[in-house]
Every structure is written in structure tokens, then in C-alpha cells.
Amino acid sequence: MPYGTILDGTRWSFPDLKTLLAKASPARSGDELAGIAAESAIERVAAQLALADLPLKTCLDEVVIPYEADEVTRLIVDSHDAAAFAPIAHLTIGEFREFLLDPATSAVDLSGLAPGLTPEMAAAVSKLCRVQDLIAVAAKTHVTTRFRNTIGLPSRLSTRLQPNHPTDESRGIAASLLDGILHGAGDAVVGVNPATDRLEDYIRIVTLLDDIRLKLDAPTQSCCLGHVTTAIEAINRGAPVDLVFQSIAGSEKANRGFGVDLKLLDEACQAGLSLQRGSIGDNVMYFETGQGSALSADAHFGVDQQTMEARAYAVARHYRPLIVNTVVGFIGPEYLFNGKEIIRAGLEDHFCGKLLGLPMGCDVCYTNHAEADQDDMDVLLTVLSAAGVTFVIVVPGADDVMLNYQSLAYHDVAYVRRTLNRPAAPEFEAWLQRVGLARTGLDPALSAAVRDTAAVAPALRYLEGLLA
């Protein structure tokens, strides 16, 4: 049905929900590339006004991708918790924004609402939020998960240590890993993006990561970010797989482009659970997403890229993941053109993921041909940390030599820990102090004496053996 409003004497009309959501979106290059963006700032404001007056339950009554044609839509509709939605079912989208910002609305309230929210609801309300709104709401939304440590506790920031290597060489991976550990990184996961998807390399990498973890006796988890079919086969062969990884998107067609569907993800999750490798929890899945992935696969069905991104979070939450992150600037300037668009998108993704009940992190990143630089990443890291982001990704020197993009460096997280008082996961932080890698909860002790600690010395000898 059409939706509309009157602005400055002009009647604006939008034929359906997906058009209204697209026109109300803050400007970004991906929606312009798709030909669905507002044609002017006036049209964008008109769409936002119409969206604000729309009943929240419209997002249940009118799907943006047909139920019969898309298994992600079916998952969203069939898993909706009407009882959790009931307390806010009477609100408009604008009133829902006011409810979220109300100081009386607590973290407990937001946690209880999550099963009753659809991705379209989260995306819609985010389009009415300014940056400080996205930060304020996300900051009081907490999602906690566990495997070998506890991720997502209030006022803590975890990190994915990403020791990639352009040829998957074990020595290079190990050297980068230990460099990151010495900086206090790696409590969310030690995760390697493999240069190939060969089963032999996958098994070698997860075995290497697990060997170093055991030698360090560190309370963390590891992951090789190969395809889930590779992970399943590795598990069948007895490989030490902690987390099962997969990139996902917001439509069935886009997920087919990643070589997955919900049935395959079900199988992967069950395979990970079967190993029972978690010591304090059983959240075994790790998902990555990113605005523009559905558009780049021609699988967005005329839906704006931020709403499509939120739909990916419905897929993720179905599997109770340990961690999820948007690789916010990785896909390129065709989808997020500059630093301003990347910063806004990172905050939107984090906001929507948290509202939907996900342990949401972010790869604070950009490609070398985007209109962005490391100053923009400093801003995004800082505002995400203020918003309570679950984790960020760190790589040696902020420069990923395998994937060829710019992210965060190890020392960037030390800045947040000191400046905003954001320690690591409690079990990992206690370990850092116990082995002498941190003098206090926020102060990595990066001195030569660190290398002589009882815990780190075996791992350094292991690295020396690899180098021999």
C-alpha cells in the first residue's frame, strides 16, 4: 500500500514499504548505484517523516522480499516472537525511537524485546536516528556469549586478532599471532582468513592456532575463516575446530552466492556443537556481514543495503553465535563512498545487531580506493567503543597483507583501553595479568621482560622451532 506525507505543501507518496525504507535512508553510494536512493534531501526528509508515522507492526504485515520466494523472509516471519513484541506493538516507528532513547528503558527491557523485533523494524528506526542516538541506544544494550571466555559484558572491549599471511605460511601466521598476544589482543578470537580454501591448509591452520593456544594456556578461541563446507569436513576428520565461520547476507539468493543456505548452516552449527570444545559455553558460530553484499550479488530485490544488512542479522541470531561482525568498509566505495558513510554505516550495523540480540562487533576498515583514511577509522573506533561494541578486529600495522585493506592496529586497542576504560574479557584479562603481559587491567606491559614470562616462553620456543 502507498505511504505518504505532506512537506512544505507538497504531497509525497511512496508505493510500498521497501521504497519508503530506501528513500528514508541516509545518503550512501550503494543505494545510489542501485537506483533506489532519495533523489534529494527534501525527498529523504519526507520519507523519514512518513516512516516515523508508520505503525511498527507494518514491518510484520508487509514483507520487503516475498515470503514464498525467500527462506530468509520465512525465517524472519516464522521465528517472530509475538509475546516479546506485544509491549511495543502499539507504537509507531517514531514512537519506538523515543522508547529506545527513554532513560527508563533498560538493558533488561531491550534484551526482552529482541526476539520480537524484525530486521526491518531495527533498520527502520535506525533511519530516524542521528549518530548520538545510535550510540546511546546501543550503549545500553548488552549481549553476552561464552566459549572459553565471556564476550560482551558491559564496559569491556574484546578483539579479534587477525594474523593473516599472503601464502598461509605457518611461520608468518605464528609470528603475527604472538605479536598480537604481546599487545594483549585476541580474546574474542584468533582468526585467520586463509589464502586458499584447501582442506589441508584449513586443518594445518586450525592445528597451528590450537597448538599455540595450548602452549600459552590462554583462555580464548581460534578460527580459520574458510567456507563452512571445509569446516564440516575438517571436523569430520578430527581437526581441532573451535568456531565455525561463514559470511552471510540478507536474502536466500545472496546466501547462495556465498555457497550456503539455512540447511547447510544448520549442519555446520551441529558439527561445531558436536565437538564440545567450549569450556564455559557453547556459542560456536562466527558470522561476518557487510552493507552492499546483497547488492554486489544482484540479490537485493530493490531493498536498500542497510535493511538487507539487518536481514543478515536474522540469519545470524538463529544460530546463537559467539560473535558477529560487519566488515563495514571492506566492500568498497561503490557501496560506502567515504569516511562519513563508513562511520554512519558502522554505527547503524552495530545498533541494529545489538537490538536484534547479537554480540555485535565491527571490522573498522576501508579499502585503499575509498575516500577514507586512518583518521576516519580513529573516529569510528572511538564512537563504536563509546557505543559498547562487542569487539573489533586488529591486524599487524593496521594493514592486512593478505586481503589488501586497511583496518586497526594492535596499539589502536591499547588507546581505547586506556582512554575509555575498556578492558578485555575478564578471563583473558586475568590471564594477561597472571603471565605478566599486563601490569593492570588496562596497561599492556610491552617490555623485553615480557618475553621471559613462563607462559609466553614456550610459545616463543615453538615459533623458533618453526623458523628453524
Image: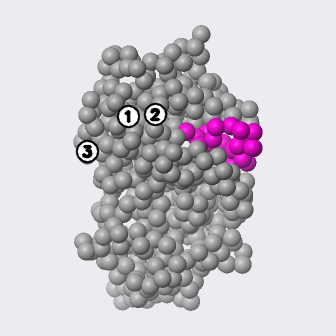
- Does the image show residue 333? no
The residue labelled by disc 1 is 431
SS class, disc 2? loop
Residue where numbered disc 3 is placed: 421
Q: Is residue 266 left or right of residue 321?
A: right
State the residue position of label 2: 218
Q: Which amino acid does the dot numbered 1 rest on?
A: Trp
- Give the answer, above or below, for where 450 lies relative to 273: above
Of residues 49 and 419, the one nearer the viewer is 419
| Three-letter amino acid code at the position of disc 2 | Ala
Q: Position of residue 108 (x, y in %)?
A: 35, 69
- Corner quadrant of residue 72: bottom right
Q: How is the image coloured?
A: one colour
Q: Amino acid at mark 3?
A: Asn
- Dot 1: element: helix
Where does the N terminus fall, quadrant-wise? Answer: bottom right
Compared to residue 260, the image places residue 57 above or below, namely below
Q: Earlier in the sequence, mark 3 or mark 1?
A: 3
Contact between labelled residues 1 and 2, with CB atoms less than 8 Å apart: yes
Residue shown at 47%/67% (left/top)?
A: 356
